[in-house]
Image (cartoon, helix red, strand yellow):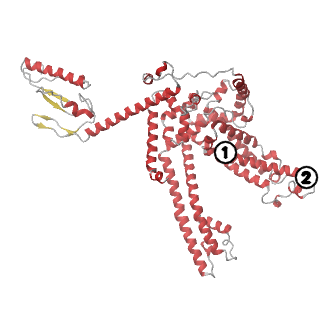
């Protein structure tokens, strides 16, 4: 363990390099077939698991992309290729949704909100119709589920308003259960939805999402609140059935609220309902990543809350230390109202952090030593808590917000991708509370399962894989079996091809860097008849007959070939010259040109014929 601790920076560096490699390999994809092979591979060796790459509704399961989300590979998920795949699946055939204006999106959302019950009933009747295909589109599923949840929040607000209007009835034992329990229809639907989500994703994947923990808490508190109300109602019925004049019959039916016990079930149920109502409204923030601006703010708030939770641990330690110290000083003076007991001292120290307490509360006029020590401890507490810790919390929150803002695009796309993947799952189409109704499609699935398991009359259809790219097909994917190939070998060849492209691209980038480094700070000047121009920077673009900067010196060293000609070699060009006074000189010049062509063939280079010209000098030369 100590060795691992020492090597932690190196392992973190390796993690970052692996993430960079994954991002680069994804960027090497050239067609949709390669993208599907990369994002849909779940990494299992089981052939059945590998072949099960699409849901029955035709939506790819994106197994590798989901794995990247689980391991917080934000750059891989936020890659343009991943986002393009997610966006195309999210909109489906609704191409008009992409790039729609905000007003249009709001109008469609309001229409889905008011027509949600009608759409759900039509889908329940005919799930395979065109309307059913429209409803199964992920973006429509998102709008339907969001509309259902907003209807649930509206119902909670209506129940609160009704309780306010009938305060005398709701504050007594005579409140009907149905008056404040209509929301339980949605709660049952949410509970069934969470059960199906656990069944589809698995418990481990389900618990990786923190929103699911909040759902568990909310549902548990709703069910506990409703169960306590049932307990009060049944207790009154049972006790009154045994003896109408008994104390418990009177307590659970007619007694005034002021005479209830502190742990009365109905009071606990009301407190739980109040807390869950608040959490339910806060749960609505989970849909904010669908919008760029609101999603970024939601991510920033979540990161700040995380910082506050870690800060609260340190705060509680220091607060408990000063609580014990100050309380032990003033516990012996019984005439004090606030200090001297844990409850009063805790409240006093807590509100001191916000400057809402008077410093004179720690004074003891007749006890100098206790007063002096109490003032010292109170002063140290004020300095540590108000000046140091609270400012440190502000700095932590500011730092977290700045990190989100610096990488806002990646953070938002990662959060939006997690939201998208929640609606790419098979099933879970009908929103709450329509999902608790048994649909005709369920009967069809049950009959089909019966025939598959017992009668074995249906055989699974063989999957036809997309055609291989030419680069992969030429690399011997088919193997020894001729034209047959497995999905695993297909994906393996795709990964090999991407690695080869990555290596080749890295080599080219390295060669480009070497070329620029070789040409860096280079100077050149022009000289004519002994007169020279000023030095000028060398262009970083290779031209002419220079075949490559990394082999520049090797290539041009043997250009003259002992011909005796004048050869001027520059960084981006080559000039040759010689005196021609007879036919022999002319044939010698032409022979050297032939040798230059042979030199180019040996070194696998090509001449730029466009810029190759012949200049003649001489007063008697007609071409001069």
From the viewer's perspective, is 507 left or right of 44? Answer: left
Query: In front: 513, or 539?
Result: 513
Disc 1 element = helix
Q: Is residue 39 visible?
A: yes
Which numbered tag is attached to residue 215? 1
Which numbered tag is attached to residue 240? 2
Q: Quadrant of residue 530?
A: top left
User: Image point 11% across, 25% down: which residue?
Assistant: 578
Q: Quadrant of residue 506?
A: top left
User: Image point 15% across, 28% down: which residue?
Assistant: 560
| Up-down relation of residue 276 to residue 356 (above or below) | above
**Residue 432 placement (x, y as % from top left):** 70, 37
| Up-down relation of residue 487 to residue 338 (above or below) | above
Instruction: Measure the C-alpha gap from mark 1 to mark 2.
Output: 38 Å
Mark 2 is surrounded, within 10 Å at the Cα level, by few (under 14), some (14 to 19) or many (20 or more) other residues, namely some
User: Image point 51% across, 50% down: which residue?
Assistant: 401
């Amino acid at each position: 363990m100590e060795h691992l601790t020492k090597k932690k920076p190196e392992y973190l560096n390796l993690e970052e390099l692996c993430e960079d490699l994954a991002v680069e390999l994804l960027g090497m994809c050239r067609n949709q077939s390669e993208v599907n092979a990369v994002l849909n591979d779940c990494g299992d060796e089981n052939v059945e698991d590998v072949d099960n790459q699409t849901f029955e509704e035709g939506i790819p399961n994106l197994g590798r992309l989901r794995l990247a989300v689980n391991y917080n590979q934000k750059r891989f998920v936020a890659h343009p290729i991943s986002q393009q795949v997610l966006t195309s699946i999210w909109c489906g055939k609704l191409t008009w949704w992409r790039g729609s204006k905000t007003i249009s999106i709001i109008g469609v959302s309001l229409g889905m909100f008011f027509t949600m019950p009608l759409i759900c009933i039509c889908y329940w009747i005919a799930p395979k119709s065109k309307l059913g295909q429209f409803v199964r589109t992920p973006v429509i599923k998102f709008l339907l589920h969001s509309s259902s949840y907003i209807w649930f929040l509206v119902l909670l607000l209506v129940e609160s308003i009704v309780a306010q209007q009938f305060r005398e009835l709701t504050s007594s034992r005579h409140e009907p259960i149905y008056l404040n329990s209509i929301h339980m229809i949605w709660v049952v639907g949410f509970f069934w939805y969470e059960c199906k989500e656990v069944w589809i994703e698995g418990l481990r994947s389900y618990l990786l999402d923190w929103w699911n923990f909040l759902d568990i808490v909310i549902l548990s508190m709703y069910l506990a609140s409703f169960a306590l109300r049932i307990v009060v109602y049944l207790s009154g019925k049972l006790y009154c059935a045994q003896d109408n004049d008994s104390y418990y019959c009177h307590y659970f039916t007619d007694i005034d609220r002021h005479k209830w016990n502190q742990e009365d079930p109905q009071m606990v149920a009301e407190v739980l309902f109040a807390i869950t109502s608040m959490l339910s409204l806060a749960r609505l923030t989970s849909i904010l990543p669908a919008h760029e601006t609101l999603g970024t703010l939601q991510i920033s708030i979540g990161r700040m809350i995380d910082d506050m939770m870690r800060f609260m641990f340190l705060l509680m330690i220091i607060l408990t230390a000063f609580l014990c110290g100050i309380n032990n000083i003033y516990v012996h003076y019984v005439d004090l109202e606030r200090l001297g007991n844990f409850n009063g001292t805790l409240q006093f120290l807590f509100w001191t952090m916000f400057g809402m307490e008077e410093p004179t509360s720690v004074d003891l006029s007749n006890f100098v030593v206790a007063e002096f020590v109490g003032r010292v401890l109170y002063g140290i507490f004020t300095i540590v808590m108000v000046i140091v810790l609270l400012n440190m919390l502000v700095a932590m929150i500011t730092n977290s917000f700045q990190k989100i803002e610096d990488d806002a695009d990646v953070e938002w796309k990662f959060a939006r991708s997690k939201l998208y993947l929640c609606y790419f799952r098979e099933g879970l189409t009908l929103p709450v509370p329509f999902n608790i109704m048994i649909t005709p499609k369920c009967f069809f699935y049950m009959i089909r399962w019966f025939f598959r398991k017992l009668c074995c009359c249906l055989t699974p259809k063989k999957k036809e894989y997309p055609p291989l790219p030419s680069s992969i097909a030429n690399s011997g994917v088919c193997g020894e079996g001729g034209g047959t190939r497995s999905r695993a070998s297909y994906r393996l060849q795709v990964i090999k091809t991407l690695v080869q492209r990555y290596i080749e691209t890295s080599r080219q980038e390295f060669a480009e860097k070497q070329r620029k480094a070789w040409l860096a700070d280079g100077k050149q000047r022009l000289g004519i008849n002994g007169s020279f121009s000023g030095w000028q920077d060398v262009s970083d673009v290779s031209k002419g007959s220079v075949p490559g900067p990394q082999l520049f010196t090797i290539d041009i060293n043997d250009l003259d070939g002992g011909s005796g000609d004048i050869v001027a070699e520059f960084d981006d060009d080559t000039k040759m010259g010689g005196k021609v006074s007879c036919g022999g000189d002319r044939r010698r010049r032409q022979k050297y040109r032939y040798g230059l062509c042979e030199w180019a063939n040996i070194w696998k280079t090509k001449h730029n014929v466009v810029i190759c010209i012949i200049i003649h000098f001489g007063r008697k030369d007609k071409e001069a």
